[in-house]
Image (cartoon, helix red, strand yellow):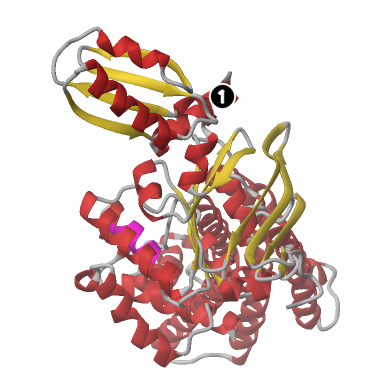
Amino acid sequence: MKLGLLFVDELLGFYKSKVMIFLWIGLPIIALLFRFVSESSSNIPFTLVSSIVVSSLAGTLASVMLAVFIINEKNRHVYELFLIRPLKRRDIILAKFFSVYTCVAIASLIAVLAGMITDYATTGTLSMTILNNAGQSLATGLSMIAVSCAAGVLIGVASPSVLVGAILVIYGGNQISVIPLVPTLLNLQDATVFTIVLAGATAAGLLAAAVALFERKQF
Amino acid sequence: MTSNSLNDSNEFVVLRNVTKSFGSFRALNGISFGIKEGEIFGYIGPNGAGKTTTMKILVGLISDFQGEVSIGGYQVPKRKDEIHKLLGYLPQTVAFQEWRTVNHALKTLGKLSGLSDAEVEGRIPEILDLLGLADVRHKKISQLSGGMTQKVGLAQALLHEPKLLVLDEPLGGLDPLSRHQFKGIVLKLGQKGTTILFSSHILSDVQDVADRIGIINRGRIKQVGTLNELKSRLSSQKTVEVLLSYVSDKWQEFGAIKNVTTVEQPSPGRVLVKLEMSADEDQVVNDIVQSIVKLGIRVRGITLLEPSLDEIYLNYVQEAEN
């Protein structure tokens, strides 16, 4: 109940502070630019380019967003007015995670969808192979984003300043988000399924650590 | 109320031997005091004395401390969920997310306090009218002045009509009119039975509204009591002031009056007669009047001087410094 309220509240915050618009328009534009400025990618279907861009960029974006949001609000004492109300501390953290994940996931879907539309408009067709590859890339991308988000939350809760948080995201957050790629790198059968499971477990572990830390934090 | 009850008296808030350290710095050193239900308790002390730490412990923002604390019979921090339903808190630094309007902040915080949609919709205009914020209801809080933001902070604390209000420096940044309004609101809430703990550096404001006052310095409670109790405990301050109509040396005769310790004239025509603590001040004033008549001195007035809260505060704080 309270988690739902906080989640909707966070989404409204992203909408009102224009974060949503920048994400949902920005990510497809970057994918588009990437395709047109990179010669080597001009022969690759745009759907795949979008998936690659989403995988590499959206995770970093999500973890930086979360870490900066949390550190900033923590240091400005914004949470004090929430923490003295009858709600679970973990709901504050989980609402942040789910809202940023939802926003970035939607931005990723829009980017890939834009790729598919562009491919269809330019070639007049969309092959099943391209769609399958795009689907797998998107699943991997969304899995990596989940891990990045969870890492961003943990870094946000643990870091004393935005600068330290940004350094930790670049040092650690990005490396951890590669974990879901392990099944693909090992050429496992049903690698996508393993990727999703592994990402879920990693994200849950990171979130549990963040929640435990936030529960014990003295404000 | 529960098995966790720490007090048998009618004290709504109880702190017993509370100690809190930050590294090697001891912010609170075994403080103990209680606040009765419906009482307005003024909490004063210099910067860094431990006021904010006490309040943060009470509201559950700091849970890592030694000692016993209870609110309404519920032990802090164990029964945080129950306590948070009773509580309204205005922190010293009140901050909201930048994108929030006054209306949206109050809506969210009201709902999180357990109010229904209809209750929130009904309470917001009421509370905004009370605090003179009706005009800024749909403005972003980040566009408001410091004083207005402080008022929004007070609004969120009052919104759900809590049984206990904890206000950390609520008057900071408020203009004189707003301070006057605030004191009126606090007095009204006290009359309705709300228990209020508030800290302030503006001692006259504390004096105006507090039923009892606690003085803290360097993490230790120096005094707790009503203003009159604090005055009577300040032994060196029992003094009668005699204002002479003209300069005369005859005032020195007051020294012969029973229970008078010293007589001095700090400025021409103003005589201070200091009494023993055990003295019946009414009797001494009567003796002074008789002496004035006998000596044929003309006077403008005789006043039994009582220490102000400022003097009491300075006395206890300086005593600790020495």
* Relative to B182, B222 lies left or right: right
**x and y percent of residue A165 in the render?**
59, 48
Magenta segment, which residues? B148-154
Tell me: residue B16, above or below residue A101.
above
What element does badge 1 sit on?
A: helix
Q: Amino acid at mark 1?
A: Glu
Front-most of residues A99 and B149: B149
Q: Residue at x 28, y 68 (%)?
A: B131
Identity of the residue furthest to the front in this view: B294
Question: Where residue B277 sits: x, y (%)?
Answer: 53, 29
Chain ID for label 1?
A: B
Residue nearer the viewer, A96 or B308: B308
Q: Is residue B199 above or below residue A39?
A: above
Q: Would residue B202 be visible to someone looking at this image?
A: no
A191 left or right of B286?
right
Q: Where's residue A50, x and y in %?
A: 51, 73
Residue shown at 48%/82% (left/top)? B111
Query: Quick check: A25 left or right of B130?
Result: right
How many neighbours does mark 1 have within 10 angstroms: few (below 14), some (14-19), or many (20 or more)? Answer: few
Say which quadrant the C terminus of chain B sits in.
Answer: top right
Q: Is residue B149 magenta?
A: yes
Q: Position of residue A121 (x, y in %)?
A: 39, 87
What quarter of the picture does the N terminus of chain B occupy? bottom right
**Nearest to the observer: residue B213 or residue A148:** B213
Disc 1 marks which residue?
B319
On whether residue B155 falls in the magenta region, the answer is no
